[in-house]
Amino acid sequence: MTWPAGNWLAGVDEAGRGPLAGPVVAAAVILPPPPVPGATDEWAAVFPRLRDSKKLSAAARADLAPRIRACAVAWGVGVADAAEIDALNILRATHLAMRRALLALTVAPTQVVVDGNRLPPTAGLGFTAQFEAVVKADATVPAVSAASILAKTWRDDWMDAAAPHYAPWQFKVHKGYPVPAHLEALRAHGVSRLHRPSFAPVRAALEAARAAPVPVPAHLAGAAHVAVNDATGSAGGATEFSA
């Protein structure tokens, strides 16, 4: 399917601002014009199903995502990882992911609609466009709805792939969101490399781990130990300590 040069609207949305672990992901999508009445092609089947990804089941999102990619004029995904989130803060990291998604587009848009009330920095994107931030655009602008679906499915798939490497935290179940099971896993197992220390529950888990006493093996508790001379390696006097 080929598209002539023209005025193209790119919708931009993110997934993953709220989780305690994993990346924040953004997608940018340029859609074809709405299908003509009576059309029976794939785009005619996909277009009426577009809506805010949060209003769709996981199965519906998984079904729609590859169809959106196949029908789109252009699409791109951008990611900011946990380290970037902690270094920049979640808002700036989200905007970084949005810029990366826009830079991944293979067609230059002339209009960009971003879900929310703030725009990412627009300098240096390589194209000139009218930018607009629209609250709840994922429910009203089809291209933004499509972007919300791509961002959500990409992030969920990423967390599912990472989950076996971080089994105690069960990321496949909650995708890093602060549900009770995740908070309990933080208390029981501490913090993983995927967690965001700048987020309060993760920071609390780190502080709790630092404050916890170092356990002494039962067979050593209360025993007398021999002090070793650092210079000679020879034994000195016995020194008592209590656990």
Image: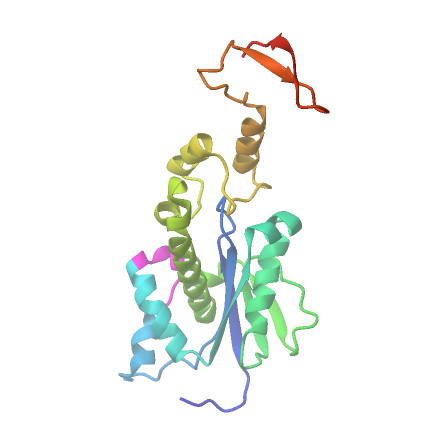
Position of residue 44 relative to residue 199, above or below, is below
Please tell me which residue is depicted at 38% across the width and 79% down the height of the picture. Answer: 71
Where does the C terminus fall, quadrant-wise? top right
* Front-most of residues 93 and 187: 187
Residue 177: where, in percent of width, then height?
44, 44
Residue 184: where, in percent of width, then height?
41, 32
Please tell me which residue is depicted at 50% across the width and 19% down the height of the picture. Answer: 216
Please tell me which residue is depicted at 51% across the width and 9% down the height of the picture. Answer: 222
Point out the stretch of residues depicted in magenta. 50-58
Where does the N terminus fall, quadrant-wise? bottom left
Whether residue 72 is visible here, answered yes or no, is yes
Whether residue 57 is visible here, answered yes or no, is no
* Front-most of residues 189 and 218: 218
In the rendered structure, the answer to whether residue 20 lies left or right of residue 157 reads: right
Residue 143: where, in percent of width, then height?
46, 71
In the rendered structure, the answer to whether residue 8 lies left or right of residue 155 reads: right
